[in-house]
Image (tube, rainbow, N blue to C red):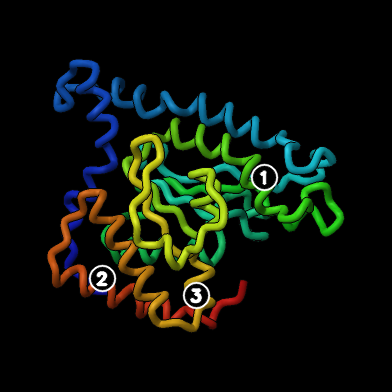
Amino acid sequence: MGTSVNKSNCSTTYESQITRQLLREGEDPTQASVKKRYIIANGKTPALEELRQAISICKKCNPKCGKKRPGRIFGFGNINAELMIIGEFPSPEDTRNQQPFSGWQGQILRQLLRIGGMPPELAYLTTAIKCNPSAFGKNSETNHGSPVAKCGINCCEFLHKQIKTIRPSVILALGPIALETLLGIKGVNISKARGQWYEWNGIPVMTTYSINQVLNSTCEATRKNFADDLVKTLQKLGLTLVRCQRAMIKKQLIELLYSTSGSLKK
C-alpha cells in the first residue's frame, strides 16, 4: 500500500531471542555456528509437541469428547516469535483446518501486520480457548451458565504453558475472552480495557477488539482505536515509526477495515 516503513528493526526480531540465549550462555552471537542456532531454535519443539498432545486428548470441558470431536487447535507460526497474538476461540473454519486464524479473519490480520511493517511469518498465532465451545451443543455439560467462561478456565493452563515455551516479548490479546483467559479475570469491558498495557509474568500485554468485533462494528471510533492499538503494539516491539509513518499506517489500517467490513461473511 505504498508506506515507506522502516522494517530493519522488525526484521531483526526473528533472531533476537536466539541472540539473547547465546549471550546468556556467554557466546558471541556473531560467531555462533549455524548448528548452535538451530539447537536453540528447536529446543522448544519437544515441549510444544507434548503440550499439543495434551490439548488433543483434553476432556475438561466435556468428558464425552473423543476422537469424533477433533476440534481442538493449538497454534501456528514462528516459535521464536517476539510477538504472540492470542485470539478468543477457533472459528468453524479454524476447526476444519486445524489452524488458528485460518479463515478470512486471519487473512485480514496478516494484511494489517504487513501494513504496519511486521512480516506475519515472524509472529506466533494461537487462541485462548483451544476448541469452539459451540461445538458441544446446547445440552452439553459445558453449558453451566456460560460455556465460554468454563472453557476459558479449563484452557488457561494450556495457554500459560504455551506462552512460557514461546517466550514472546509482547502479547497482543484480541477480544475480551483472550484477556480474561490470559489474566484470569472476569467481566472485561473491551471498550474500556483496550489500548492499555497489562502484564503477564513480566511480558507486556496489549488488548484490543477481536477482528470480528472490528469488522462487525458500525462505529468509526472502533476501527480507529483498533488501528491505534496495533501501532502501539508494533512500537513496543521496537519497530521504528516516525510520526508521519504512524499516521499513514493508521490511515491504511482503517481503509482496509472499512473496505472489508460487511463484504465478508463469518
Q: Amino acid at mark 1?
A: Arg
Q: Give neighbour class at mark 1: few <14, some 14-19, many 20+ (Cα, 10 Å).
A: many
Amino acid under label 2? Ile
Tell me which numbered mark, 1 or 2, is placed earlier along the sequence: 1
Q: Are marks 2 and 3 in contact (CB under 8 Å)?
A: no
CA neighbours of label 2 inside 10 A, class few (<14), some (14 to 19), many (20+):
many
Residue position for label 2: 249
- Label 3: state its secondary structure: helix
Q: Is residue 235 or residue 190 the one in the foreground? A: 190
Horizontally, residue 54 falls left or right of residue 69, namely left
Task: Report if residue 188 is visible in the image.
Answer: yes
Residue 127, compared with residue 232, is above or below; it is above
Q: Position of residue 41 (x, y in %)?
A: 36, 29
Marks 2 and 3 sit apart, C-alpha to C-alpha, by: 18 Å
Which of 221/131 is in front? 221
Q: Earlier in the sequence, mark 2 or mark 3?
A: 3
x and y percent of residue 84 in the render?
Answer: 41, 46
**Which of the two residues, 21 or 217, is positioned nearer the viewer here?**
217
In the rendered structure, which disc, 3 or 1, sits on the residue that comes first in sequence? 1
| Image quadrant assignment for residue 43 | top left
**Residue at 60%, 76% in the rendered image:** 265
Quarter of the picture containing the C terminus is bottom right
Which residue, given by chain and number where applicable, does mark 1 sit on?
A: 72
Q: CA distance from mark 3 to mark 1?
A: 25 Å
